[in-house]
Amino acid sequence: METIIELWRFMRARRKFWLAPVLVMLTLFGGLILLTHGSPLAPFIYSLF
């Protein structure tokens, strides 16, 4: 949790708010890949990329 707070402070101090959507999308795609790693839905997820 400390890492997230530190990252937010960095973005706020240096006005790098454009990083927030990039980080959110990376987190969502990473979670999607982890959740569908061994599932039968995996072939359908890979077709999205």
Image: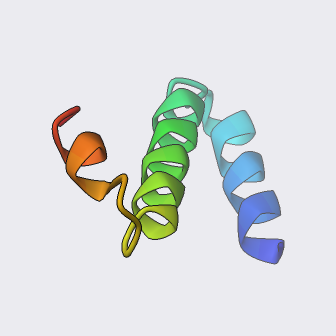
Q: Answer above or below: position of 4 versus 2.
A: above
The C terminus: image quadrant: top left
Q: Quadrant of residue 11?
A: top right
**Residue 40, position in %: x, y?**
35, 61
The N terminus: image quadrant: bottom right
Say left or right for 1 vs 8.
right
**Number of numbered markers:** 0
Q: Answer above or below: position of 7 versus 18.
A: below
Say left or right for 39 vs 15.
left
Q: Residue at x 59, y 34 (%)?
A: 20
Say left or right for 44 vs 30.
left
**Residue 6, position in %: x, y?**
75, 63
Q: Answer above or below: position of 37 versus 27.
A: below
**Residue 19, position in %: x, y?**
51, 34
Nearer the observer, 47 or 28: 47
Q: Residue at x 43, y 62 (%)?
A: 36
Q: Residue at x 77, y 50 (%)?
A: 9
Nearer the observer, 42 or 10: 42
